[in-house]
Image (spheres, rainbow, N blue to C red):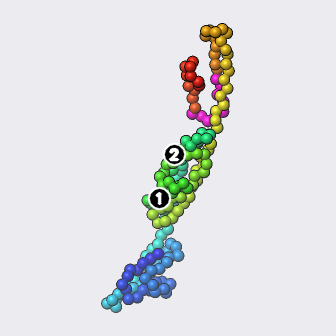
């Protein structure tokens, strides 16, 4: 929307309209002729350029364990459009990083300073739980120390470990 300013006696835009404001039809060259109180005329020409739309530059996603809300999404930023950018996630958050997320889809609306928008979506996957298979060898006699437990871990998502606790604790 172009505005020739208030307080003029007359306005004339290149399409013949005579209002103070003019709705552009996109990028291009526009002119307006105004008459001031002293009967003077002035013509102004303006070039309207498209700035483009904001584009997300990527997201990092961390999956969530089954039944837990420990996933995360981190928005890397935006390019294009006109900074600064406002972020709005589907849950209402306005920060680039979301934490404590359950598995699911999270949508992001990026709005630039001119009101142009772009959307992005992140899928927080549900990680696979590891399968723990113990093999127990009982002691041969009461008080003996020849028993053992071997644990095989399969499946699951990388990043888990093993913890061996004392004889009076469960693993």
Mark 2 to mark 1 CA distance (whole Å): 19 Å
Q: Taking the image as drawn, is residue 136 in sight? A: yes
**Residue extending furthest toward the bottom:** 39
Report the mark closest to the observer, 2 or 1: 2
Q: Residue at x 45, y 74 (%)?
A: 47
Task: Name the residue that disc number 1 marks.
Answer: 86
Question: How packed is label 2: few (under 14 Cα within 10 Å), some, or many (20 or more)?
Answer: few
Taking the spot 64% from the left edge, 23% from the top edge, the residue there is 151
* Total marks in image: 2
Q: Is residue 36 left or right of residue 100?
A: left
The magenta span reads 151-159
Which residue is painted at 49% across and 87% down in the image?
A: 16
- Pick whichever, 64 or 42, lies toward us: 64
Does the magenta-highlighted stretch encompass residue 150?
A: no
- Give the labeled residue for mark 2: 99
Image-quadrant location for residue 143: top right
Whole-percent x, y for residue 136 in the image: 67, 19
The answer to whether residue 71 of the structure is visible from this angle is: no
Residue 3 as seen in the image, left or right of residue 101:
left
Quadrant location of residue 168?
Answer: top right
Q: Point out the tag, 2 or 1, that comes first from the N-terminus.
A: 1
């Amino acid at each position: 929307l172009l505005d020739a300013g208030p307080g003029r006696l007359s306005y004339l835009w290149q399409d013949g309209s005579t209002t103070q404001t003019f709705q552009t039809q996109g990028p291009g060259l526009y002119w307006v002729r105004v008459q001031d109180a002293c009967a003077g005329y002035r013509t102004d020409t303006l070039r309207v350029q498209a700035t483009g739309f904001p584009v997300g530059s990527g997201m990092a996603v961390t999956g969530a364990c089954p039944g837990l809300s420990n996933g995360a999404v981190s928005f890397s930023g935006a390019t294009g459009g006109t900074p600064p950018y406002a972020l709005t996630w589907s849950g209402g958050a306005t920060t680039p990083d979301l934490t404590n997320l359950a598995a699911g889809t999270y949508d992001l609306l990026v709005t630039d300073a001119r009101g142009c928008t772009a959307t992005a979506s992140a899928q927080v996957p549900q990680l696979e739980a590891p399968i723990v298979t113990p093999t127990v060898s009982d002691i041969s006699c009461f008080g003996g120390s020849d028993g053992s437990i071997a644990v095989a871990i399969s499946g699951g998502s990388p990043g888990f470990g093993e913890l061996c606790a004392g004889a009076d604790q469960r693993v």
